[in-house]
Amino acid sequence: MCITDTQSINSSKPEYWEKFYQSGDTGWDIGKPTPVFKNWIKTQKNKLSICILGAGNGWDALHFAELGHRVTAVDFAESAVLNMNITAAKRRLKLNIIHGDIFDLDKLFTNTFDIVLEYTCFCAIDPDRRDDYIRLVNHILNPSGKFVGLLFPTDENLDSDGPPFGVDIDTTLNLFSNYFTVIKKEIPSNSIERRKGREIFVILKKNGN
């Protein structure tokens, strides 16, 4: 998906995304849990506190909650939050769904989560705020926490029309290195078809204090 109508509504505003949910034009939504994350969560022996940034319709959040993890899902589009709440109620799942801007989470959480999960949020925010994003992730993770993400799209330039805005993996990991150490970096074999070879799965461990 490439959204280029940036003049009428800024993509940093919830109204920008709300219009796509209202129209059903949510090309980033795969309608099910992400295969890469489904495989990853199977390897986790303990129940985790997980924060999902820009959770959208919440397929990964709902899946993790079904498995018994303590999930906080955040989005600032009203329809996305409504959809998550409806699905969670239907499935009788308990998770903390927050309608708000991810950049306000530092007012609610400090050293809280075991995992911050990323998919299609980092590439959707204003690239000028990527440092803010990384500082936020560091702030809300507990001292031994991890950032688990699919960094996408790695085949686009940063200055290309977006969102999604391009993600150069070396530049991005260099930004994260102020707070994190890379413990896994790979091109996943089970990406959804339209994103094969265009994303990199990473696990970064918080350096701690």
Image: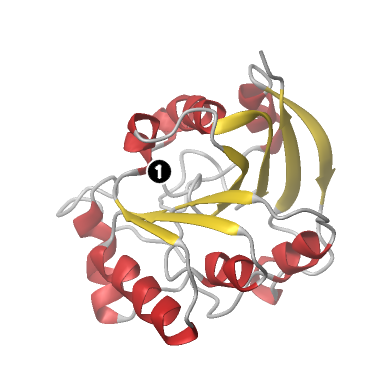
**Whole-percent x and y of residue 7?**
18, 50
Label 1 CA crowd tier, 10 Å (few <14, some 14–19, many 20+): some
**Label 1's element?**
loop
* Residue positioned 70% across, 75% down in the render: 193
Near-viewer residue (188 or 140): 140
Left or right? Give the position of 179 relative to 124: right
**Whole-percent x and y of residue 127?**
43, 35
Q: Residue 166 sits in which quadrant?
A: top right
Residue 205 in the image: above or below residue 198: above
The residue pinned by badge 1 equals 125
**Whole-percent x and y of residue 117?**
60, 50
Q: Quadrant of the C terminus?
A: top right
Q: Residue 192 sits in which quadrant?
A: bottom right
Residue 48 in the image: above or below residue 40: above
Residue 14 in view in this figure: yes
Residue 196 in view in this figure: no
Left or right? Give the position of 60 relative to 44: left
User: Which residue reaches farthest top?
Assistant: 209
Q: Amino acid at mark 1?
A: Ile
Residue 45 in the image: above or below residue 109: below
**Whole-percent x and y of residue 42?**
81, 65
Near-viewer residue (87 or 202): 87
Q: Residue 19 sits in which quadrant?
A: bottom left
Residue 12 in the image: above or below residue 88: above
* Residue positioned 40% across, 80% down in the render: 89
Near-viewer residue (158 or 93): 93
Near-viewer residue (106 or 190): 106
* Residue positioned 78% across, 59% down in the render: 40
